């Protein structure tokens, strides 16, 4: 497996200890006590953590896939694939690993984990899962989810996902993630108990914000354009690549026919017979070599796919920013309007439309006492509003700061990974050319002996 | 080539072509035969068709005066034919320089035919004339008429579907030129045909049309008599060797047809692959425009794919222009051979019928009449000529296919080398390392 895996050494580096502008930051610190190995003892104690980091590391692998049958929510029989996740702790001194946890999970549980992470870490570019259904297939690959090749590639993709999360400085400390690796039963209930689904922003709200936000941070706007373009170009690339693979397969396989006809021809020849026969054999070798070549190329395609899906995660962070910014703008607008109302009430001029003004016109003026009461209410609201605006502003700035830090981290990771992917793709091409030269040179020698 | 005089075979009756060692096959045939090295006189009149070729004496043919054009008297030349070193050659013919001629009635192409020869049959040492396809066609017809016992090489297809192929395109003209060149070279290599009067006229005459009008018909005696063979005689039994040749040619043509279809299919698939590649490469360029650090490697991949596309296009063009035409020509060639075989069958059938007629006459001392003897001569000459031509054909087929298939392998090697080298450069390998990377074994 030649994928660009995250560097094992980077798995559990000490995470930056800046406070997260999120109410549930407390969850992460709770992880410390229960976690083994390099999980920290709590925020704020960098030195302790570093000691632990060098003592122990953990290794995660998705080692097996198994077909299962069970009953679904509607009590109907269903077939699904379960994946075995094994966690090992490695003693740094002697490099030996000990199996600490082993459990089975299915794809939908991975999805649940990711959705949870998306809600609780909106400022993080959350690693994507491998595709749910096979897309960008070329004719040989089955689009069937039960196909062994698809399952195998998915297993690798899921392992990659876990390694990415485990090597992320912030995500790796999440308790739910830890429980995902260690607590087989009841994990789903635990996740759902966090109530994360309720905390999720509605799609509609996010879309609304996208169109109406007035002053988003320019960097996020640019980043959103970039992620859109990236998605578009990688999709196009994968689609064409699949067609290229299809055609290349055809070219190689047709050469196999030479093998048969040379063999038949050699039967009627005297001196030419041997040369033809052995050349035919080389043509067969050539035709069958394409299977391995294209299998290797699938790994390259998977690496590109990961970043196709990463683009979506990038967009999600941008959307969150837009939403927060929109929220802020709305709150500021509301506050301004209330201040206006208050001023008008105090001075007696009516410039803004208000329901009270309307009813006053219809039903008569209010008494000075009533007016005082209203001003008081408004003043309270304005106070509250100013507090809220202040904290929203603070949250917004925190978000931008933390998100941008993770985006920078992501950019470096992306450049590194894709550079490696492109190099390994080039190496595959060189290997293919080398094999081609070898086969045809062998065939040429056979022909020369004709 | 073969060290001594060709071995004579024991006259045990007709043998299959396969079992008989090739007279010019060198040591292997000598081992297979062993025994006798001097032909016995009985063989001169024997009915075993196999030995006729192997008789060495120049004047050894039993029937009719030996004419210089009879192949059996020129067997020595057979040995020399296989020497491609050119030292023993005294006739060189080349076809080149196609030119388009536009006239009121038609437009056509002429080719320059250059001849260099020391033969006495040529007045000048060098000739240069221009000929068009029609003239080649005329030559071929004349050769078939005047040398009916010999295999005349095929011409490239006469008719071209207008609208599908452009008769004046560079590729078409070049392909045709090569085929015409091959045609003349095959005649040049033939010990009998190269001395043909019509061939001489074709190579030397300033105004070929004048000669055509004269209707020169210089036929050999054998040719003359064969020409008058009427069809309609039923063949009793075809001698094994000719039956074997016939069977061989049938299967051979079938296999070539299959190879032609496979080659065409490969080219088609390669072209479709090329179409996709031409879309694939630029997408990397588009992506590269979005990126910073990744821009260079992405652009590099795009360039590599572009390079591969160019190399692939060259491969498909080469295969279309060089490989397919030669393959098709051999199918035509085996068709030519088969029609000559049919003629031979006819000659044999006539002889057998006449012989039978004599046998039925129930004379006390049946004497073979002169006309039947003539038939026998005719048949035996034909058999000898045909066998000699078949051997020659087999040899040149072997060389031609060796060259053709090695060429095909070469073109593919070059394609992979060109593609691979560019990627090596992309990954940062130096030139020297590229070679060891691409050509290392194992």
Image (tube, rainbow, N blue to C red):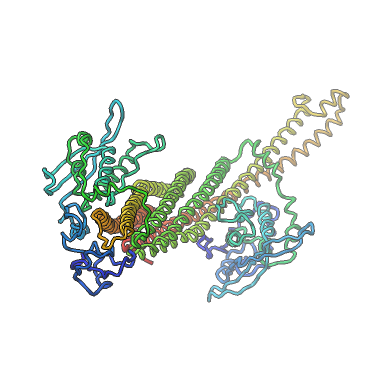
For this rendering, which residue is in front, A382 or B227? Answer: B227
Quarter occupied by residue B236: bottom left
Quarter occupied by residue A42: bottom right
Q: Is residue A415 left or right of residue B109?
A: right
Quarter occupied by residue B430: bottom left
- On the image, the x and y values in percent for residue A176 come to 69, 61
- On the image, the x and y values in percent for residue A6 come to 53, 61
> Would you say residue B407 is visible in this rendering?
no
- On the image, the x and y values in percent for residue B261 come to 43, 51
Query: Up-down: is A171 above or below B322?
Result: below
If the image is split into quadrants, where does the C terminus of chain B sit? bottom left
Q: Is residue A10 left or right of residue A31?
A: left
For this rendering, which residue is in front, B264 or B147? Answer: B147
Q: Is residue A105 left or right of residue A425?
A: right
> Would you say residue A135 is visible in this rendering?
yes
* Label tally: 0
Query: Up-down: is B57 above or below A97?
Result: above
- On the image, the x and y values in percent for residue B36 come to 22, 73
For this rendering, which residue is in front, B311 or B191? Answer: B191
For this rendering, which residue is in front, A27 or B163? Answer: B163
If the image is split into quadrants, where does the N terminus of chain B sit? bottom left
Tell me which residue sits at (53%, 76%) in the image.
Answer: A94
């Amino acid at each position: 497996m030649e994928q660009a895996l995250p560097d094992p050494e980077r798995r559990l580096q000490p995470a930056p200890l800046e406070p997260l502008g999120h109410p549930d930051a407390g969850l992460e610190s709770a992880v410390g006590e229960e976690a083994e190995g390099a999980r920290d003892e709590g925020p704020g104690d960098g030195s302790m953590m570093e000691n632990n980091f060098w003592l122990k590391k953990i290794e995660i692998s998705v080692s097996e896939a198994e077909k299962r049958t069970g009953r679904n929510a509607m009590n109907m029989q269903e077939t699904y694939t379960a994946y075995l996740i094994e966690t090992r702790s490695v003693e740094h001194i002697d490099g030996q690993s000990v199996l600490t946890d082993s459990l089975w999970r299915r794809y939908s549980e991975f999805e649940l984990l990711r959705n949870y992470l998306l809600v609780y870490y909106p400022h993080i570019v959350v690693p994507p899962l491998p595709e749910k259904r096979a897309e960008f297939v070329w004719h040989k690959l089955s689009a069937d989810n039960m196909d062994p090749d698809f399952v195998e590639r998915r297993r690798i993709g899921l392992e990659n996902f876990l390694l990415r999360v485990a090597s992320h400085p912030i995500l790796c400390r999440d308790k739910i993630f830890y429980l995902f690796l260690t607590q087989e039963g009841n994990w789903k209930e635990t996740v759902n108990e966090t109530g994360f689904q309720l905390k999720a922003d509605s799609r509609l709200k996010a879309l609304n914000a996208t169109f109406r936000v007035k002053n988003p941070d320019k960097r996020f706007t640019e980043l959103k354009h970039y992620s859109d373009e990236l998605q578009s170009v990688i999709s196009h690339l994968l689609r064409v690549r699949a067609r290229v693979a299809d055609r290349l397969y055809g070219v190689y396989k047709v050469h196999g026919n030479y093998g048969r006809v040379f063999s038949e021809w050699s039967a009627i020849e005297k001196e030419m017979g041997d040369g033809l026969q052995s050349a035919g054999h080389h043509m067969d070798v050539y035709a069958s070599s394409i299977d391995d070549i294209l299998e290797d190329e699938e790994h390259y395609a998977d690496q590109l796919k990961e970043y196709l899906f990463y683009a979506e995660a990038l967009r999600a962070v941008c959307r969150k920013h837009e939403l927060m910014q929109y929220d802020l703008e709305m709150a500021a607008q509301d506050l301004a309007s209330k201040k206006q109302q208050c001023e008008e009430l105090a001075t007696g001029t009516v410039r803004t439309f208000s329901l009270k003004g309307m009813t006053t016109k219809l039903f008569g003026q209010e008494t000075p006492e009533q007016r005082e009461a209203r001003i008081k209410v408004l003043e309270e609201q304005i106070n509250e509003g100013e507090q809220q605006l202040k904290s929203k502003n603070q949250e917004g700035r925190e978000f931008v700061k933390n998100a941008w830090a993770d985006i920078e981290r992501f950019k470096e990771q992306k450049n590194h990974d894709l550079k490696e992917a492109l190099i390994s793709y080039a190496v595959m091409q060189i290997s293919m050319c080398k094999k081609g030269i070898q086969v045809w040179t062998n065939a040429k020698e056979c022909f020369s002996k004709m | 080539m073969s060290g001594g005089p060709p071995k004579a075979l024991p006259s045990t009756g007709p043998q299959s072509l396969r079992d008989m060692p090739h007279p010019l096959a060198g040591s292997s045939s000598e081992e297979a035969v062993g025994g006798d090295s001097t032909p016995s006189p009985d063989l001169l009149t024997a009915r075993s068709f196999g030995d006729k070729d192997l008789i060495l004496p120049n004047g050894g043919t039993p029937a009719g005066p030996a004419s210089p054009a009879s192949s059996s008297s020129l067997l020595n030349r057979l040995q020399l034919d296989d020497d491609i070193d050119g030292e023993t050659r005294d006739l060189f013919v080349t076809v080149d320089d196609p030119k388009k001629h536009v006239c009121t009635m038609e437009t056509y192409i002429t080719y320059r035919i250059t001849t260099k020869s020391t033969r006495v049959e040529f007045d000048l040492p060098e000739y240069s004339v221009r000929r068009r396809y029609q003239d080649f066609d005329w030559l071929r017809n004349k050769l078939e008429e005047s040398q009916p016992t010999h295999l005349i090489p095929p011409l490239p297809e006469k008719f071209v579907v207008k609208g599908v192929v452009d008769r004046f395109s560079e590729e078409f003209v070049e392909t045709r030129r090569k085929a015409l060149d091959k045609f003349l070279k095959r005649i040049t290599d033939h010990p009998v045909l190269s001395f043909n009067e019509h061939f001489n006229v074709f190579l030397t005459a300033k105004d070929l049309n004048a000669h055509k009008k004269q209707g020169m018909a210089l036929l050999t005696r054998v040719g003359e008599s064969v020409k008058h063979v009427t069809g309609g005689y039923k063949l009793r039994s075809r001698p094994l060797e000719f039956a074997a040749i016939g069977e061989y040619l049938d299967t051979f043509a079938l296999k070539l047809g299959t190879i032609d279809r496979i080659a065409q299919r490969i080219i088609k698939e390669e072209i479709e692959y090329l179409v996709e590649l031409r879309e694939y490469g630029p997408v990397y360029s588009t992506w590269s425009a979005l990126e910073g650090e990744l821009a260079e490697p992405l652009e590099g991949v795009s360039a590599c794919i572009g390079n591969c596309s160019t190399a692939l296009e060259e491969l498909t063009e080469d295969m279309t222009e060089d490989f397919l035409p030669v393959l098709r020509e051999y199918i035509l060639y085996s068709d030519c051979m088969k029609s000559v075989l049919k003629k031979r069958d006819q000659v044999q059938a006539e002889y057998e019928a006449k012989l039978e007629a004599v046998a039925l006459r129930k004379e006390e001392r049946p004497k073979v009449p002169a006309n039947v003897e003539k038939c026998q001569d005719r048949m035996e000459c034909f058999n000898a000529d045909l066998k000699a031509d078949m051997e020659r054909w087999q040899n040149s087929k072997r060389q031609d296919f060796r060259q053709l298939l090695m060429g095909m392998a070469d073109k593919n090697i070059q394609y992979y080398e060109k593609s691979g080298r560019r990627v090596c450069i992309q990954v940062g390998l130096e030139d020297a390392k590229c070679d060891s990377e691409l050509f290392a074994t194992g």
